[in-house]
Amino acid sequence: MTNRMSRYGAMILAVVLLVGLSCSVAAQKKVTIVHWQHHSPARFEVVQTFAEEFMKQNPNVTIEIESVPESDYFQKLLPALAAGSGPDTFQIPAGQVPAYAASGVIQPIDSRVATAQQIEAEFIPPAIKRLKQGGKYYGFPVDTQTIVLFYNPALFKAAGLDPDRPPQTWDELIKYAQAMNKRDDKGITTQMGVATGGYGPVLISLMIQNGAPLWDTKAKLPDFNLPQAIEALKFATDLVNVYKVEDPQFGSRWNAFRQEKLGMVFAHPAMIGSFRATVPDLEFRIAEVPAPKAGGSRSTLLTSWAYVVSNKAQSEICSKWVAFMTSAEAQKHWTLSTGDLPSRRALLDLPEYKNNPLLAPCMESMKRSVPAPWTTRRLDDELIRKAYQLVTLKGETPAAALKWLTTEGVQAEKEQQELAKP
Amino acid sequence: MSAHLDNSSLDSALRKHNRHEFGETAKWQRIIGRALTYILVTLGAIMMALPFVWLILSSFKTLQEISIFPPTFFPRNPTLANFTEVFERIPFARYYMNSIITSVLPTIVTVITCSMAGFGFAKYRFVGRNVLFWVILSTMMVPFPATIVPLYVMMAKAGLINTYAGLIIVGLSSASGIFLMRQFMMTIPDELLDAARIDGASEFRIFRQIIVPLVKPALATQTLFTFTGHWGAYIWPLICVNSDRLRTLPLAIPYFSGQYFSYQNLINAASLMAIAPVLILFLFTQRYFVEGITITGMKG
Amino acid sequence: MSAEATTIRRRGGNERKYRMYRLQKASAPYIFILPGVVFYLMVTIVPMITGFWMSFHNWSIIRPTQPWVGLANYRKLLADPLFWTSMKNTLTYSLGVVPLQMALALLVALLLNTGIKGKKFFRLLYYLPVITPLSIAAVIWTWMYHPNLGIFNQIVSIIGLQPQDWLGDPNWAMFSVILVAIWSGIGYRMVVYLAALQGIPRAYYEAAAIDGAGRWDVFKYITLPLLKPTTLYILVTSVISSFQVFGLINVLTGGGPLDATQVVVSYIFKRAFGDLQFGLAAAMSFVLFGIILLITVIQWKFLGREVTYE
């Protein structure tokens, strides 16, 4: 019964749509762009503002935004793509662009909107490296983040450290952390020196800084069996096991930093907004990550997503819309509202960022950043975190943990490369 | 409505029985036992209620206070701002309406269809009974990642994505509901049905006038569970709904969270407001938990 | 049946009426089950069959073609150690949660069905975990489990045992998750048992009392046997849901540390929505399905015999 009702409903709907469609064709090519992205209150507001502005500039366009809870984004996107009823423009992790491009789900950016040369001239290379497939760009970068060091100047002062001189090397980081780390007479941490949280992008950044390419260019597969990578993992796990300046039992590192019980924490610049909202009175500062040795590299991992255009969507107007959301004006807006870092060359040296003590180190970090060479998302956090825990919880050596990680990573990467085959 | 194990003849009989055997010692044992029962039940209840009480208290806390760890129990500066802010930021009333539409109707239908089907499976022998019942039971055993995409594709083909019909149609019956009703109806003596048949009652009348009154607690339970299930449904509405017009409450709450931080104060206030109807329904259905209904009169 | 038939015949004596009666009697069960079965299977059976079909394909969702691969997905999961780790964890979880949760739910239901003062209020309190959002319950439990500030370690130290990192230690994480799961599901099962207890005729208790039966005997020989259909329902649905646990573990541990709480459905979910391997995920789903079905059939064999009131 309900089935029949729905069939009638569908028929009526089809008629209405047809009439509506023919009318609009007669009037002017009216276009509706359905745009999906993952949600945070701030991101939603930003894109809504963009949509209003874009619709004002293009009166024939209507934009419908669907902001999907971050943790459930793929649960909603994938069935819709499978049924062919997906959005016109949406976002995917930059690493997955090859797979989506190869499967024909998305189309390249319309050259009338931006040519490959234009895109390369305007954006910094690490932000767009993963978006190119077969000489064409399939999207614009969004949600761009690097890793920086947040620190608490009050705790620095209390420990006799100079807040204007954040740690410059890994050795210094350990010394600073030791100075700020406090324990009670039972040995329970009451104030913690530093935290990486065992978070994947932080650990990868340490390896990159230490000169590990993490990539076997011949086999085109991930490789962590490198002395530089082992040394980096050893450094991160020694903070817990040897120097005892990071205590996993201390609880959430964000809570600790908010409550001024954590001296330094490796984090994405987007945490600025989080701290501002939850602890408006907290005084904190940001520095680029310390180098492994004096004069060493401060390059960290660039993580990003891409705004892409569905193969079913109208090429030009949709390309125009995603370009609009990543224009110079738009990127400024992103940085202000959500803490996303700009990926356009022209913006990184703006005086308003250079003179902002919180943003200046983020912009420098952006210039030095490196994207992950692999396409599998499991290597971004899940597997790396496990390798870290194998050392901190199971007492494995960093070398053994990275051997395990390489095996797992190669397997995961092969599976994803299979998807990216034409 | 008095509790039978204490005030009924059973209890007095037991008491007599015990006194006869153990005398004064038994009396003391009983008092201690009673006290222990109260202590245990109360301790358990505190454990059970603690997170919910915390939720209530926390919905009056500011974002700054809610971000403190270890959490505070009582709000330092209680505020109602969270509740008003929820309404300012999202069309909460509209979502409430949608939740009511997509929960009440399917709940009524489900309780009817499940109790009928449960009766059919429990009290009749017919060709295909066991096969059908096991097919229904087995659909509960397939984890959702295997079926959610095919379900979506099917519903998209039927043009039901982003419609009330699409939200409602998946909830007009339930396997666990049929199963639950079957189990309850099995305990009703067959003689009762046969007696009615001899009196010339039709099968449908038997169901309506004999069975339904007998299984009121089960119906109340089924209503409570079905409503709770629909009210909290998340995955299907998440992928089925593409507009504010149709969004339900569970989809509204993640609105306040993001990748890097969440407005936990607003989440708490919105959650509390969202839960209220389930709580009220629980209190309401408890009225039907009246012991030892009618069957007592039939036999014994 | 013959008795009824003769009744009808005697009354009406009308052949047509009798035929109508026969027809009504024969079609009655089908009419009763029709709406429930149709409404339910309409939205479940096609997805289930399609899901099964998917498991024989390299179904990577975004690809335009989904090639048939026969049993390749099944072979792949057989060789996947993490799948079996998660299966083992699921079994541990189920064994840890289901029996204890059922026993406690029955105990609470029995206690709250006696003349205890304020039993309606207590029933409400015991039901609260069922409606407390998981994410909020997780905040409180994470606090209670906190290695330095949590109440658990304070209790443990008073007793003189070693404090633990309850959720952060691979050896304790599953235990801690099980505790939360038991907590969150008692109320639901308590309500089912309470509903069932209302249906037990008081006459049985009265008869037992006259026979001089003790409380334990009453429970063992009257209450428990009469609750058997309910127990079967709770057991079967509890096992099914415990084998498919997902949300609770997701908010508490996310499957970690080091896969100590990784369960089958969260692994399937990751393989499907994270890695786009829907064919493989479907194959895993149907292996899990087979295992649950087998366990259910066994339970049915032992508890499914119909009880009758004698």
Image (tube, helix red, strand yellow):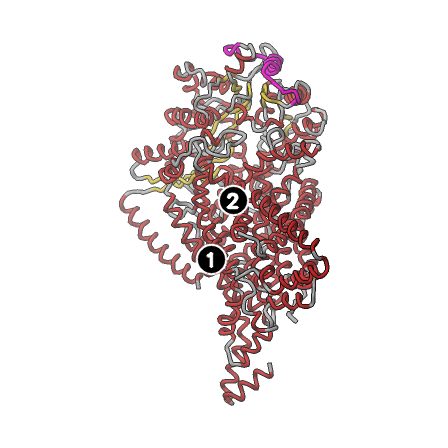
* Tag 2 residue: C132
Is residue A44 depicted above or below C52 in this figure? above
Q: To which chain does the residue with label 2 belong?
A: C
Is residue B21 depicted above or below C77 in this figure? below
Answer few, some or many: residues within 10 Å of disc 1's Cα (few below 14, many 20 plus, some between 14 and 19).
many
- Position of residue A344 measured from the top left corner of the image (x, y, whole percent): 43, 22
**Residue A186 shown in magenta:** yes
The foreground one among A108 and C277 is C277
Toward which corner of the image does residue C237 lie, by quadrant? bottom right
Q: Is residue B32 visible?
A: yes
Q: Amino acid at mark 2?
A: Thr
* Tag 1 residue: B107
Q: To which chain does the residue with label 1 belong?
A: B
- Position of residue A187 measured from the top left corner of the image (x, y, whole percent): 66, 22
| Quarter containing the C terminus of chain C | bottom right
**Which residue sits furthest front?**
B24
The residue segment tinted magenta is A162-187
The foreground one among A421 and C115 is C115
* Secondary element at image label 1: helix
Query: Residue shown at 68%/19% (left/top)?
Result: A242
Circle 2/circle 1 CB separation < 8 Å: no
Q: Between tags 2 and 1, which lies in front?
A: 2
Is residue B28 depicted above or below A29 in this figure? below
Query: Residue shown at 65%/47% (left/top)?
Result: C97
The foreground one among A134 and A419 is A419
